[in-house]
Amino acid sequence: MMGEPTWVCGVDEAGRGPLAGPVYAASVILGADCSIQGLKDSKLLSDKKRQSLTLLIKQHAKAWSIASASVAEIDQLNILQASLLAMKRAIEKLPIIPKIVLVDGKQAPQLNCEIRTIVNGDRLIPEISAASILAKTARDAEMIKLHERFPVYGFNQHKGYPTKAHFEAIEQYGICEIHRRSFSPCRCFN
């Protein structure tokens, strides 16, 4: 008689560095029989490849979930704590309770299960790579939607990251409601 499967969940975030927009996190349980070719750190993939892998992950993973923490939560808590909150939300939304949670990086959210942090986990562990891809594609999609509300900033291009074009837009128009006021380039507009 076989025992219950040991569900291993990978979790990662996207959007700690931008000056605008929420931070996203995803959690993924691939399952022992799930093999998706090409999984790696989302930053090492083209947008087109991330999109195709997102579809495969959503179709073939045993379970997956995406969550976020708002700009207000980032400004209130700080970006690290908001990232951990988004991770916790993504894990708690899973329809399966994981036995082990593997987190990219050095810090993990408080959870009632075994947790392991893995530096460069998004390059080493398929579950974390899958979570990295889901978090990145979800956040990028949100920033493209936010571009429709705030077109002068070019969020559809730089996704809120501190690029020359973004700094020039802030210089010309000031900041908007989705800018992180606790981040130093935006702080002088408070």
Image (cartoon, helix red, strand yellow):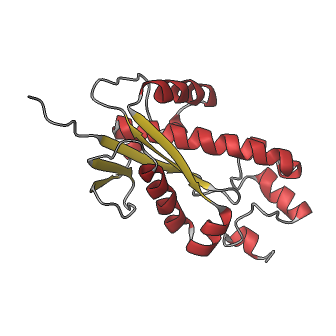
Query: Residue 73 falls in which quadrant of the image?
Result: bottom right
Furthest residue in direction right, as rendered: 172
Q: Judge by depth and name the residue closer to the eye, 160 or 35.
A: 35
Residue 166: image x %, image y %? 79, 54
Identify whether 27 is placed above or below 113. above
Residue drawn at x 79%, y 59% as measured from the top left: 167
* Residue 64 visible (yes or no): yes
Residue drawn at x 85%, y 50% as measured from the top left: 149
Residue drawn at x 66%, y 42% as measured from the top left: 140
Residue 62: image x %, image y %? 38, 31
Q: Quadrant of the N terminus?
A: top left
Q: Is residue 7 left or right of residue 51?
A: left
Identify whether 9 is placed above or below 185. above
Q: Is residue 125 left or right of residue 1?
A: right
* Residue 155 visible (yes or no): no
Residue drawn at x 54%, y 44% as measured from the top left: 135
Q: Is residue 78 left or right of residue 114?
A: right
Residue 57: image x %, image y %? 47, 29
Residue 190: image x %, image y %? 79, 77
